Image (tube, rainbow, N blue to C red):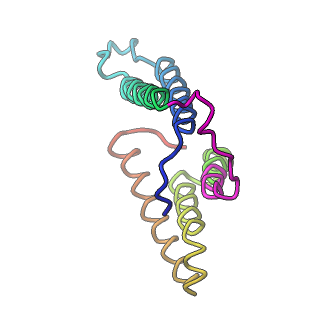
């Protein structure tokens, strides 16, 4: 693990990304149905929790940006060169998440199976280098499938049966 502290400029950019994500979450939460036609309390509106999470993310992103500014992020001296090879895990995660959201959810398999496939592939992909060097790829694949099936069922059960959220 790399013990170097991220540069102030990296913190500034990260904080801005968190604030942008928080803004998108808050906009989405505001647009959610408020269940006014059911005379529901404002505290039972589906967007209240995502909205509060968006507010918290925005606050923390702003704190990160402020801390980076105090550390001299705009001075220009601490801007590191981007090493794309070191970002392979990030790109793998983004690719897998997009494949799940765009390619699996609502496009054929039931949600529990789509979630199980996503989790199994993600676990296997991130453990692949270590499993290959240790010679335990088959065991890693089996463990990933078991994790995927258990987590896929657990997510489906919690949302569909406990929270009564209709899943695709």
Would you say 25 lies left or right of 87 here?
left
Residue positioned 55% across, 29% down in the render:
16
Q: Residue 155 vs residue 83: left or right? A: left
Instruction: Report the front residue among 92 and 110.
Output: 92
Residue situated furthest bottom in the rendering = 135
In the foreground, 1 or 59 = 1
Query: Residue 102 appears in which quarter of the rendering?
Result: top right
Task: Please tell me which residue is depicted at 52% across the width and 60% down the height of the picture.
Answer: 119
From the viewer's perspective, is 28 left or right of 42? Answer: right
Foreground of the two, 49 or 33: 49
Residue extent of the magenta highlight: 72-95
Report how many numbered discs are placed on residues in the image.
0
Position of 64 relative to 109 (above/below): above
Dominant SS type (magenta): helix
Q: Position of residue 5 (x, y in %)?
A: 47, 49
Q: Is 137 situated above or below 41?
A: below
Quadrant housing the C terminus:
top right
The answer to whether residue 89 is magenta is yes
Instruction: Decide: is 13 above or below 32.
Output: below
Name the residue located 53 percent from the left edge and 51 percent from the top edge: 111
Nearest to the observer: residue 132 or residue 153: 132
Quadrant position of residue 59: top left
Residue 157, x across and y down, in percent: 38, 52
Residue 27 image point, x, y percent: 52, 20
Residue 87 located within the stretch drawn in magenta: yes
Instruction: Residue 82 in the image: state x and y as whole percent.
Output: 68, 47
Residue at x-position 52% and y-position 82%: 139
């Amino acid at each position: 693990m790399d013990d170097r502290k991220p540069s102030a400029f990296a913190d500034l950019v990260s904080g801005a990304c968190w604030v942008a994500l928080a803004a998108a979450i808050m906009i989405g939460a505001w647009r959610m149905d408020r269940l006014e036609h059911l005379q529901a309390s404002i505290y039972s509106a589906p967007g209240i929790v995502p909205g509060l999470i968006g507010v918290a993310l925005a606050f923390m992103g702003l704190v990160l940006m402020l801390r980076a500014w105090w550390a001299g992020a705009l001075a220009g001296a601490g801007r590191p060169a981007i090493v794309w090879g070191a970002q392979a895990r990030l790109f793998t995660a983004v690719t897998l998440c997009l494949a799940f959201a765009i390619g699996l959810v609502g496009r054929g398999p039931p949600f529990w199976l789509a979630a199980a496939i996503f989790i199994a592939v993600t676990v296997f992909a991130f453990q692949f280098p270590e499993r290959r060097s240790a010679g335990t790829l088959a065991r890693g694949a089996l463990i990933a499938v078991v994790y995927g099936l258990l987590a896929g069922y657990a997510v489906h059960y919690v949302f569909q049966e406990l929270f009564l959220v209709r899943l695709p």
